[in-house]
Amino acid sequence: MRSVAPIVIVVAVLAAVPLVVQSNVTLNFLGVALMIALAGQGWNILGGYGGQYSFGHAAFFGTGAYVTAILQMRYGVNAWPAFALGILGGALVGAVVGALSFRSGLRGSYFALVTLAFAEVLRIVASVAPITGAGVGTLVKLDLRVAALQFESRAIFYWVILALVAVALVVTHLIERSRFGAWLVAVRENEDAAMALGVNATAVKLAAMVISAAITAAAGCFYTQYFLFVDSGIAYGTWMSIEALLVPIIGGVGTLFGPLLGALVVRVLGEAALLVTGGAPGLDLVVFGCVLVLVIGFSPRGLMGGAADIVTWLRKRGARRPAGEAGHG
Amino acid sequence: MLSPIILTTAVLNGLLTGAVYALVALGLTLIYGVLHIINFAHGALLTAAMFAAYFAFKTLGLDPYVAAFLLAPVFFVFGYALQRFVIGPNSHGDDRNMLLVTLGLAVVIENALLFTFSADTRTIDVPYAFQTIDLGFTFLAVPRLVGFVAVFVVALALWLIMSLTDIGRAIRAVAKEKLGAELAGIDVAHVYAVTFGLGTACVAIAACLLIPSYYVNPTAGNAFVLVAFTIVVLGGMGSVPGALIGGLVIGVVESLSGLFLGESLGQIGIFLIFIAALLVKPRGLFGARA
Amino acid sequence: MAEPLLDVENVTRRFGGLVAVDKVTLAAPQGRITALIGPNGAGKTTLFSMISGFLKPSGGAIRFRGDDITGEPPHRLARRGIARTFQIVQPFAGLSVRDNIRVGAHLRHRARDDAGRVAEEVSREVGLAAMLDRPADTLTIAGRKRLELARALATAPKLLLLDEVLAGLNPSEIREIVPVIRALRDRGITIVMIEHVMQAVMSLAEHVFVLAEGRIIAQGAPAQVAADPAVIEAYLGHGAAARLGAGASDGR
């Protein structure tokens, strides 16, 4: 895509939603969906465009969440800089994990394993460290002022997360059109061939990791402001690592709008599962797991990929009919 | 605190626990050695097997050591079916896809257990659970001793299968050179499924060995499996002796660090070793290629 | 003769107990086509991998335009002006032909449009202009070989390492691509090629090195090397030279 027009249109449409929909339940649902989409957009940069599958993106989400909460509650830092520092913190963790992993030449399953391990280490540390409140977690004081980045109206929270998603969309778009993006995709397709063409694969992967971590961390910072409570299971638990990867894979890895689409689908399925079972834990994740397996099995490029395939198939059928005979083209 | 008796006991207990870790790791390394994938569903399968052993005791009155003879073949078939009909077909032969499919399976199995049985922790009471053997200077728990011996029996059985049977030879052929094996007429999909089944059977036996002394809940398997990952990376992906020796070593390390650092930090020790092992020497001590 | 562009001096590579490349010394003069031939398993690709930075030599030194480049990583060598193709073609399968070549062009051009323009020029040079918007994985073997070449060319190399670029092509495809390679030499690119297709080696190469069991066993002009008994033995086995009446005197 050459221009930002599609992004502007999608964001504008989404921004108009609270003007039409008044129900808090719906706004809450959509707000959380956008938060998960944001986390997925982060994963998508490293996993979708870069081809490095992280199974521990919760490490960045949780760091963003905790840093934002702890800076406000223990150090009296204002919510807005705390938010920014949360993003920075997540980026830093990304830099460390990336530097360690990529300099050791870890790829594929090994990389997935090491990211999983890092997230687990953080979870265990957070569950016992005094600064995070250990097992009890950290509660952020209710303070409904703009200065404290808390709002009474769900609509405003919705617009905040939408703004973050829009930024992530623009960042992704810029990457897609840049030299860095071309190099990143080349590394994904064939790392050795890319290196032979002058691409510093390690540096490219590391940069992608840092950007990816920062975006997912932003989702974590938002979580803290929205729910006002974070503990080690919420911050670093596997649920976020799974949702961060599930969402782009279902929507379409390596596509701009994939994570958004995937987040919507996942949230709808999740709510449907909860309705059916009346809130019993576990069924929604069972559904997610099944969807993951089915998507990989039947449409590995996700919904956007599947849609593109259908369009191509329709075009081919349309072109063949006038020609009237087989074996053409 | 550091008396030789306490240390020795810790080491001995570490060896006993380590043996069961080794059995779990054995299944994992077998699957990696042949299919070249890291089976992310391994932990969930262990948990499922532990639940199966639990219910075999509660509803059928089967002693876990007896149940092992029933559950091993049952889980073999389950593992076979999973690889043949779910993982294989949905992965389209791509490693990255296989990662995701096994992850998806792990999520499904673990949460299906959560949904069905809730998060409650359960234990079983067997009469010999607290029996010990008196070594003079210390006591060792009988269930753990039985477990230790059983692991070596299973390892021996696996070795016999690999060396003496046709399917064992086929598995070794596919592990070494898949394309050549295929051209020689070996049904690779079948071999893959058998291997996955064997790995799952290992996990089922490990579950039966664990259940007299441990609790069961939907996330129980995860703790063991992350340890198993560590062992497999340390001992070398695809190396059976590496898994056995690595398991014993890790068991001892965990026991000693639990002694000095306490429960939860002991867990971190394992992870840090894991990360260090991946970063420094992904091929492991007995390594196959990374 | 001017100082060679590429200077390989006593380079050795060991894999555990196996010596794959044994104190090899060779030089590629600037602006010429140099061929590296030898039976399978002689160590040719290992040598290429060391020159292009994918493997570190166990011993010896490699110099490029006078600078010591031993052990430098591939991406830095590409920046210096060394490009290579792979024996087993490695296209960026999910991308179009244009995007494939563009990756190479980006080495010298930051902007997407500039890189795109270079990609188009290069595609014309190798004859892929008609395929620019096709997905790379729909190309035939011959097309993929041209793509390998195009990608490497897009990096504006001074030295081009071609690893069996003619392998898998039928005679007419070979006939089409040989002039392309010659044209590259004519516009100043130094070429070192590993090749098994002897007719191409004879017609393209100005200087030939023969590698067998990790060692250089002969070097010189193509015709000279073809008649060398040691070379005949390496390819056809011990005693073959004598059986063939060594040193074909009819100038084959």
Image: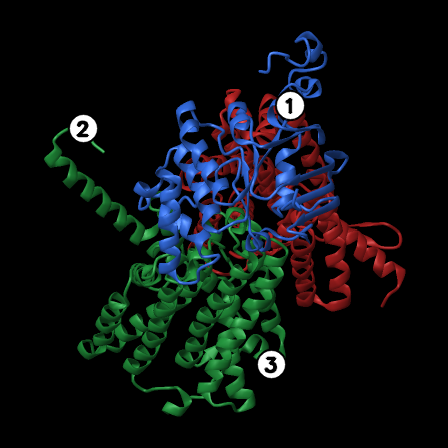
The answer to whether C210 appears left or right of B196 in the picture is right
Asked whether C70 or A305 is in front, the reply is C70
Q: Locate residue A124, reporting x and y percent.
A: 60, 68
Query: Which of the chains is red?
Result: B
Residue position for label 2: A326
Query: Which of the chains is blue?
Result: C
Residue position for label 1: C224
Which label lies toward us, 1 or 2?
A: 1
Amino acid type at mark 2: Ala
Chain name for mark 3: A
Q: Locate residue C37, reporting x and y percent.
A: 61, 29
Residue A14, relative to residue A249: is it above or below?
Answer: below
Residue position for label 3: A131
Q: Give yes or no for contact between labels 1 and 2 (Cβ–Cβ under 8 Å).
A: no
Q: Locate residue A203, reporting x and y percent.
A: 55, 61
Chain A colour?
Answer: green
